[in-house]
Image (cartoon, rainbow, N blue to C red):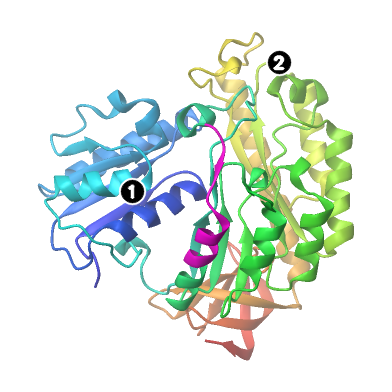
Amino acid sequence: MVMESITTTTLGCKVNYADTQAVAGMLPAGCRVSARIVATCCVTAEGEKQSRKEVRRAAREAAGGKVFVTGCAARLKPEAFAGLGANVEVVTGEPQEVAEAIAAALDLPSGGGEGEPVSQAGARTRFFLKVQDGCSNRCSYCVVPLVRGAPRSIPAADVISLAGDKVRNGFRELVVSGINVGSYRDGAVRLPDLMQELAAVEGLARLRLSSIEAPDLTPRLLAVMAGEPRIARHLHVPLQSGDDRVLVAMGRRYDRDRFSRLLARAREAIGEVNLTTDVIAGFPGEDEEAFRRTLAFIEESGFTRVHVFPFSPRPGTSAEGLAGRNEAGVVKRRGLEARQLSKRLERAHWRRKLGGVSEVLLESADSRGYARGYSSDYTRFTVPGGRPGAVELVRAEGIGEDGVMGKVVTVGSQ
């Protein structure tokens, strides 16, 4: 097993996962040292707290091995990880710089591995394909531009080359990832052009967009998605608030009306598409009426799942000093209500699947032989007897605690 003694833990966004995969791929294969890599998150105070907790746990369990702390929280507050263990070392920078620093600290020879940390090995199904980093939108609540920097795009030729390599090495799905992926630009190549080229990679089963801002849902991008069946019928479109006044305070690039029109454009172009979103609960100045408008707008928009972020002031952001901050109890209650709404909407989505047949890419299986995976529209399926790494036609027959229970009706592709 490659890199069997180096394990990874990643918190946060898809870009963090992509960076972790990249670091692992640059470390030498077959090394026999004991070490852990923890990729941290700072998008919320809770993300920072969980990052520190994970580093403490890794330091205790490392049995004398090194613990390398990377990711956004390590960039924002490296001092926050001081004192968590004598074996803890903060390493920041681009993936290549991080990999070189880790290799030097462990006295490893130079040379690339196979791109798979042991914690993500097994059925090589989904690869997070980083195409872009950084953001210049300057939303008032967001600390990410401070730690990720200005937007920059990876050359299209490099992206296509890496995609082909990963598919040839057994990955079935590529997740196109970036901090602000809609801003992708490499000369004349824009995101729609890149998606079209990636969809043509030989042997690829599925191509998925990780997340996209509503104003970046251009007619050209939607036309590419509609015309290529291998592109997933799922869009994660961050909303953040359904109240126009709060949206202005957040520095978002739309109001309710424009957001609705952009979602309608997507549905008209693609047809059946599953929409999920992000919402911030308890933003400064959000009163109860504004919060109720947000919940209603989520339902009206047809979202099936909501990733809820309780507001927490981030250092260096303009929202840190905004007046009208809600009490912690109010923020917590609103976050809970939004998550309850999300669960209700998600279960309703699962019920609508019953009796239908979906193409499911199975990713893993437990000791009982229950395989788990996702359909094109990002619905979670559990399939008894399914084969990890295979694409199967699955009939939805019931609802479980964390997704749809299905049965293979036709053996798909290996």
Residue to which mark 2 is pinned: 285
Q: CA distance from mark 1 to mark 2?
A: 42 Å
Q: Check disc 2 and report its element: helix, strand or loop.
A: loop
Instruction: Specify whether residue 169 is in view.
Output: yes
Task: Pick the residue in front: 167 or 206.
Answer: 167
Residue 331: name its quadrant.
top right
What residue type is disc 2 on?
A: Gly
Count of numbered marks: 2
Residue at the extreme bottom: 410
- Which mark is in front, 1 or 2? 1
Q: Check disc 1 and report its element: helix, strand or loop.
A: helix
What residue type is disc 1 on?
A: Gln
In the displayed structure, 13 sits above or below 150; it is below
Name the residue at 50% across, 66% down: 161
Name the residue at 32% across, 41% down: 54
Q: Position of residue 35 (x, y in %)?
A: 19, 52
Name the residue at 61% across, 42% down: 180
Q: Is residue 258 left or right of residue 359?
A: right
Binning the other alpha carbons within 10 Å of mark 2 as few (below 14), some (14 to 19) or many (20 upward) gives some
Q: Which residues are magenta?
A: 150-162
Instruction: Specify whether residue 375 is in view.
Output: no
Q: Sequence order check: which comes first, mark 1 or mark 2?
A: 1
Residue to which mark 1 is pinned: 96
